Image (tube, grey):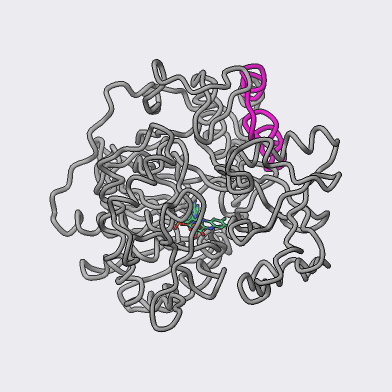
Amino acid sequence: MVIGSGISGLFVALEARKLGPVIVLTKGSIDDCNTRWAQGGIAAAVGPLDSPEQHLADTIAAGDGLVDEHAARVLCSEAPARIRDLIEYGVAFDSLGGEVALGREAAHSHSRILHAGGDRTGAQIETALTAAVADPLITVLDYTLATRLLVENGRLAGVEAVALQTGARELYETSNVVLATGGAGRMFTYTTNPDVATGDGIALGFEAGAEIADIEFYQFHPTALHVAGAPPFLISEAVRGEGAILRNAAGEAFMSRYHELRDLAPRDVVARAIVSEMRKAGAEAVFLDCTGLKSVDLAARFPAIYAFCKGVGIDMRTTPIPVAPAAHYLMGGVRTDIWGRTTVEGLYACGEVACTGVHGANRLASNSLMETVVFGKRVVEHLESGAGGAAKPDPAATPLERPAGAAPGHQAVQQMMWECAGIERDAAGLRAGLAQVESWKPNAHPVGREDHERRQMAVLASLMLTAALKRTESRGGHYRHDFPTRDDLHWKKQQVWKRDA
Ligand SMILES: Cc1cc2nc3c(=O)[nH]c(=O)nc-3n(C[C@H](O)[C@H](O)[C@H](O)COP(=O)(O)OP(=O)(O)OC[C@H]3O[C@@H](n4cnc5c(N)ncnc54)[C@H](O)[C@@H]3O)c2cc1C
């Protein structure tokens, strides 16, 4: 059984059908997932001058001292073969003059980003995989929410779920489950993620006894559209890669004051610079100015961004785009080994819900889509081998109690997390957030999707706040006002959490 129908869930289902029938549970429609919105592309060292070693070096540098080198080596060396698998499943990557077209993104030393449909890579992948899973061996149960993982004698035994359209509670007895539930952007007020991204899989895994790691590391994307009444649609870094410039409310190009790489500085640096400029001006946004890019056909190079901006009355060719940072990508999650095994036998995780260690404290752009398929393939190889077992538990894992209550509502938890555990954090804010979580009352008989999500969001909030409070340094996606520098002496290590038995 697979939980989730983004790239990781569908890819695992396709690979696993050779072992027998596969059921995919998904809480919305099949294509309601983060994958559908991915723009830039998927990273693989397939260019003539590139190599997996150089991809690895860039991945390690981006992760700010915490990348698991072994896992990252797996990622970078197996990436080219997984591109071939995606092509076989029908993904048509863009090409130029008969060769695959390779884009370049910040912190990559080579052009190694494959894309499809221009900036519609995720949608193209999701469409191709959705068509491929129309197979008698794969049953997709949409609008079906997984609510609990059942564990017997330390081994996975089944899944409890709710069929959302009828309200019927379902029980599936199964000994192998792959969590592919994606990220958690909806824990925050402003996010590029769709509303299914409430981090359910992390709470499900934690409650089942699986270890959770790196949960304090969250990536905020610096440039999401900021227009009243419109969702914070992602304005890809590739737009700055083409030469677009960030300007503050006074029209000043400010990034040279913050980093030598200016507009292409690391994402966390750009996000904090924008927050600082917004704060100084008392403004809610800064502006991404593409009006000087006369040699780029913006409508052709960025069709999705161009169309979305046009839809809200902004022609990016002539008008600077109002942008502000938004929650984007969760580096941490359910801890796995390089075979996707969690610390609970029979429970696997892959994709954004998992923490394989390849991102460390910060993700290298476009490694996330690749991580889903590299480790998804390995999950199935491991199942096929019949070796069983679980990931080795971390002896230093810290027991944590599950909070007694449920979030009072999505907006309340999002606002608390945005204010207390957002782009800039400090002890007072994190403690205030934890105090709120402790005051939340249980929802005794959760019925629909919202009720269950509120319960799971409380678990995730508690994990994120606790881990962020404990890490008294700044590193990657975790920035503390009160501890603004990286502290390798005490913190060049992962924090791992497990449920207090
Ligand atoms: C706007 C945007 C742009 C991005 N651009 C890029 C990019 O260019 N390159 C890149 O590498 N990455 C990019 N990313 C990140 C990347 O898209 C994601 O990390 C990746 O798609 C995650 O895939 P996934 O299969 O793990 O999760 P998802 O695609 O999010 O799928 C999760 C699935 O789980 C289901 N689910 C969740 N909870 C439950 C539950 N309790 N019960 C049943 N089903 C459940 C959801 O409904 C969904 O079907 C981007 C992300 C966003 C939001």
Question: Is residue 168 in view from this perspective?
Answer: no
The stretch in magenta equals 409-433
Considering the image in quadrants, where does the C terminus appear? top left
* Depth order, front residue of 447/432: 432
- Tell me if residue 418 is in the magenta stretch: yes
Q: Position of residue 54 (x, y in %)?
A: 32, 51
Considering the image in quadrants, where does the N terminus appear? bottom left
Residue 396 in the image: above or below residue 90: above
Q: Is residue 98 left or right of residue 379?
A: right
Chief secondary structure of the magenta span? helix
| Residue at 62% in and 54% down | 195
- Counting the numbered discs, the total is 0
Q: Is residue 314 left or right of residue 53?
A: right
| Residue at 57% in and 54% down | 196
* Depth order, front residue of 96/28: 96
Q: Position of residue 494 (x, y in %)?
A: 38, 28
Residue situated furthest bottom in the rendering: 98
* Depth order, front residue of 167/190: 190
Question: Is residue 70 in view from this perspective?
Answer: yes
- Tell me if residue 1 is in the magenta stretch: no
Q: Is residue 173 left or right of residue 474?
A: left
Residue 252 in the image: above or below residue 501: below
Q: Position of residue 248 (x, y in %)?
A: 79, 44
Q: Position of residue 337 (x, y in %)?
A: 27, 42
| Residue at 39% in and 32% down | 65
